[in-house]
Amino acid sequence: MGRYTWPTADRFQQSIAGGRLSSEVRARIGLDGYALDAQRDAALAEVLATTLDVLSVKSFSAVGDGVADDGIAFNLARAALPTNGGTVVVPPGDYLLTTAFTFNGQDNVVLWLMPGVVLTGEALPTATGNNFILDWRSGNIAAFLGGIVNEDVFITNNNGLVIGHTAQVSITGATAELQILGTGLDDSMISIGRWSADANSANVRFYKSRNAAIGSFTAVTTGDDLGRIIAYGDDGTDDDTLSSAIIFDTEGTISTGQVPGIIRFQVAAAGTLADAMTIDSSKNVVIKGTGPHGIGGPDQSNVGLTIRGAFTSSGASNWSVGMDVITDLTGLIGDVSYQAVVYLRGSVTTQGTDTNIGIVAQLRVDEPDIANNLASGGKPDVAASVYVNGEPDEGDVNAALYVASGVSQFHGNVFIGDDANANMTTGLTINQGAADDAIMAFKSSDVGHPMTDFWEADTYGQFEKVEATSGGLVVRGIKDADGVSSNALLLQGNLGEAASTTKSTGGQGVVRVLASVTDGGTSTAAVGTDGNLLTIGTGANTRFIFDAEGTAHADDVWTDSVF
């Protein structure tokens, strides 16, 4: 009882003639009283055509009311199948399976769940045989809760698995065969986990072949999509409005063991996707768009690219920085104009409504906001807005800072070799340390004097110390032989009014030379009696002396003559 085997194949074919079930077949498998549309009736006929052994759980006293334990009836139907398999049909109903229901050890089994079937309970179907097929084709399972299948489960093509709903839903014009549909977080989420004592992880894998036969191989070509993750949003009208996507493409030369890839991160502004960022097979990252962009934090509407970060160093080294740019640049033949690790360039178009802009610059650097937490009132040795650590030595000209052309302006103190000057508000301070040569030199390519034992040929003036340890200033002029034979050093004053005519100790001249000495403390005093104010000489010999009393001395007789 329960098994229906047609005497012959011809008899069976007559029973499903025209792709419809005959009344005899419907009665045998417990479908009397259930209306099936033509499509579902034909689908069931197709399944029944796969075997002459068709069993219905109704023939084994299954109730299908959700109260009685139908597990026994399911097992009886399964046990009645021949060893080479067959079909167990479950007509519509609510089946409670308390008794374990298995297909263990049986091959080529089809468990046919008709539309409207609900399977509940703690002992849902399990299988360990080969080719166990859970088949509902043009129908669907209203609920299939729990259960264990210990063998591969095959869902035939054009049929699907829906979790969280009673029917497949068409989204963006496509009806996916695997759907998870829900109204909350848990029932609309996929979790993939792996528990293993190794470093391997769970995987989501995409695969693409240009061969139309599953399991066969034909290489993809450049530009083929290997996989897509696409997000759509409800715009209040339909479900096919694109929002964003991650696309895995191919590029470059494809050969055995080599499929170069490019990842495209895309967003849609008006329903059309466009690249926002790409990462190619050479690990080049390109951020598209005109901005504003933000890295490490939100962007700003008035900034093209904002890089933010609240970073705390690990303390593993003796230094820390917020952003480190490291580039190993290798030039190739033809790169003869310039090679640079970082190149800043751009253009600025000013607005037309304002009449003035405070600053337009290629680079602006503000002072760092330093919160000094050093113990015992300590301070950083150097605190700077820009710190240049050194210069190269491989060039014909080497510099820590090189301005090729244009005007350089400094508004504030400029220090060379020093960091403070209490007596200067704005100006230039040069500290040459223990060096005893020139502190400042003036050069010109037009000059070519012969006195190169002391000064470079193109030097025409310099400042230096008189004595190594006590100081004093030498103002030196150096002149070649190309001009008039005079004026190697010229002191010239240009007064914007008539010169003073006072002839007394209070008289002033257009050019004035003052001499003073220390007052024995921290200030200065006039030169004392008979002290020399000014000397004029040549080589090591003094020829004229002017003293504090105004007396002039010469090593020869003064000549009083007219030019």
Image: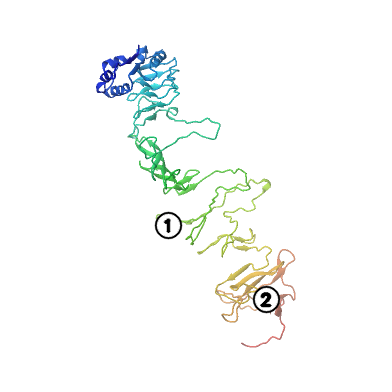
Instruction: Note whether 172 is above or below 7 in the view shown.
Output: below
Which residue is more in the foreground, 179 or 522? 179
- Of the numbered discs in the image, which one, if any, rests on residue 355? 1
- Residue at 28 percent of width and 24 percent of height: 39
Front residue of 435/394: it is: 394
**Spatial separation of the CA atoms under disc 2 and disc 1:** 57 Å
Q: Position of residue 532 (x, y in %)?
A: 72, 75
Q: Decide: few, some or many residues near mark 1? Use Cα within 10 Å; few <14, some 14-19, many ≥20.
A: few
Residue 183: x and y in percent read 40, 28
| Residue under label 2 | 505
Q: Quadrant of residue 40?
A: top left
Image x and y of residue 79, in percent: 40, 15
SS label for mark 2: loop
Q: Position of residue 44 (x, y in %)?
A: 31, 22
Whether residue 394 is visible, yes or no, is yes
Type of amino acid at the residue the image marks with label 1:
Thr
Instruction: Locate the C terminus by quadrant.
Output: bottom right
